[in-house]
Amino acid sequence: ELVRRLAAAASPARIQASGGVRSPRDAERLLEAGAARVVVGTAAFAAPDALERYTAAFDGRLVVAVDVRAGRVVTGGWSQETELTAEEAAERCAAAGVSRLLCTAVDRDGTLQGPDLELLGRVRERSGLPVLAAGGIRSVADLAQVERMGCEGAIVGRALLEGRLPLSTLAVHG
């Protein structure tokens, strides 16, 4: 319901929905409600064929969250470390036809310590996909660095809440 209300009220902004997407049906409901894109994290790595099932159903509207701590992908609300490296996850996503990634440096999320540019560079290089950066972004200068790294965009939270990144300085793109 929230996505439906936001999509109706936010025009011309586009909604990217995430959190709790555990099945293709969950993603489909969010898209039907008006989300332009859906982020899938844990479920994308839950089974060997999971990525292919999502990409077959949602093509360019799918974003896969590659949440990384100490070089390894974490799932289950960042509580479960997998054996999968960030680079391996990026390659798997590209091979499965994923259209873009959301790469979060979990250890930096909410810390305002700056983005993990090395991680972002490795994920971009290994996947060849558009990447949304998350984790630690604190300033316009950080956003400029992320852009120079070739990232498509960034997710910012705490910096906005604390007024370090005034909303008026951000450009919103589809």
Image (tube, rainbow, N blue to C red):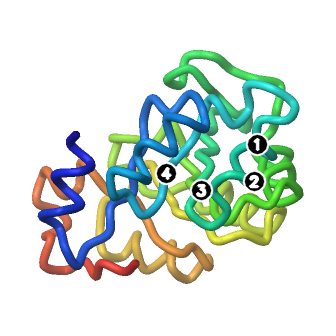
> Residue 119 appears in which quarter of the rendering?
bottom right
Q: Residues within 10 Å of mark 3 (few under 14, many from 20)?
A: many
Count the labels in the image.
4
The amino acid type found where label 3 is placed reads: Leu
Q: In 3D space, how far apart are the residues under numbered discs 3 and 4 (Cα atoms)?
A: 5 Å
Q: Which residue is mark 1?
A: 53
Q: Which residue is mark 4?
A: 38
Q: Which residue is mark 2?
A: 56
For the residue labelled by badge 3, is the local secondary structure a helix, a strand or a loop?
strand
Q: Which residue is at the front of the view, 30 or 160?
A: 30
Left or right of 43? Residue 140 is: left
The amino acid type found where label 4 is placed reads: Val
Residue 21 % position (x, y) = 50, 33
- Could you tell which of marks 4 and 2 lies nearer the N-terminus? 4
The amino acid type found where label 1 is placed reads: Arg
Q: Are marks 1 and 2 in contact (CB under 8 Å)?
A: yes
Q: In 3D space, how far apart are the residues under numbered discs 1 and 2 (Cα atoms)?
A: 5 Å
Q: Quadrant of the C terminus?
A: bottom left
